[in-house]
Image (cartoon, helix red, strand yellow):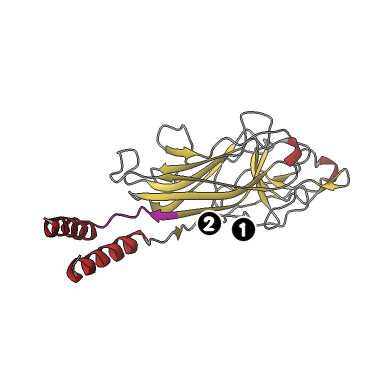
Amino acid sequence: MGRLVKSAYAFAAAALVASACVHAQVLPLINPGFEDISVTLAPGEMINGMGSTTQPTTTRWPSPFQQIAGTPQTGVTVAGWRSFVPTPPAQSLVGVLNPSATINNQLWLTGQSGNHVAVAQAAFASQTLNVLLQPSTTYTVSFLAGIGRTDLSYSPRVALIAAADTTSLARVGDGVTTTLTFNPWTTITQEQFGVMLPFTFSYTTAAVLPADQANRYVGLYFVGSDGFPRVCFDDFRIEATPVPSAGPVALAVLAGCFVFAKSRKR
């Protein structure tokens, strides 16, 4: 093979490698670890829904923490995340919890990254980013999830969603929000209770976004269960990685090299 052909092959190979060297971008989730709240929570104290500046909420002590209950707080807000917020004295089954309470001489939950976790039972919360969904992109979601020592087995349920706007409360099944994918069902068994565990899942968009994804915003949705089980969440992260292309110029050079080398052999 001549030097010209070898050089062309080398160039094409380098171009292909370069086209594959894409970098993940961490998307700007607000309050991914649920530390940005407007009050200091006592151990076992929970925010009653994801309160906002326009709809603040209260705190309460859910089971099994009633025995250490103090005075509920009012005017409470949570940055970034949204849920239905009840009108007192109604209670929400989703919110932010300080899990560092001791039950039967054991910490109820360990392994969280900070002082708080999100907790959800038969309720949901979501966050829509001011980031449009992109074609030919792999979105990777990672998070911690766990079940407290006194609760029931279940799987974390987290969905990557495409929301119609950044102001409405996005919800799976609301007829407007597009569900891109849920994390695979992975039951947290009783032997794993009391410890936060790592989870991850991905979704790759098409080269041409369908109508229910085009001009939509990236979002996250999590739900506790369809009944009694309660799941804790922490440290959400979304990475967006463009799908590497083969590189049309590199492919054209490789094709030309192949034809030229084949003609030289005749």
Q: Where 29 sits versus 182, above or below?
A: below
User: Can residue 196 be seen from the camera position used here?
Assistant: yes
Q: Residue furthest front?
A: 266
* Dot label at residue 30: 2
Q: 191 and 16: which one is in front?
A: 16
Q: Quadrant of residue 113?
A: bottom right
Q: Which region is colored magenta?
A: 240-247
Q: Is residue 136 magenta?
A: no
Q: Where 238 sits versus 120, above or below?
A: below
The structure residue drawn at horizontal position 78% and vertical position 40%, both measured from the top left corner, is 149
Q: 201 and 169: which one is in front?
A: 201
Q: Residue furthest right?
A: 105
Q: 263 and 221: which one is in front?
A: 263
Q: Position of residue 110 (x, y in %)?
A: 74, 51
Rate crowding at label 1 as few (under 14), some (14 to 19) or many (20 or more) other CA atoms within 10 Å.
some
User: Can residue 133 be seen from the camera position used here?
Assistant: no
Report which residue position mark 1 lands on: 36
In the visual, does 185 lie left or right of 203?
A: right
Majority SS type along the magenta span: loop
Quadrant where the image shows the C terminus: bottom left
The structure residue drawn at horizontal position 44% and vertical position 59%, both measured from the top left corner, is 24
Q: Secondary structure at mark 2?
A: loop
Q: How many marks?
A: 2
Rate crowding at label 2 as few (under 14), some (14 to 19) or many (20 or more) other CA atoms within 10 Å.
some
> Whole-Å distance between the Cαs marked 1 and 2?
9 Å
The structure residue drawn at horizontal position 76% and vertical position 38%, both measured from the top left corner, is 191
Quadrant where the image shows the N terminus: bottom left
| Amino acid residing under circle 2 | Ile
Tag 1 near tag 2, CB within 8 Å: yes
Q: Does label 1 or label 2 sit earlier along the sequence?
A: 2
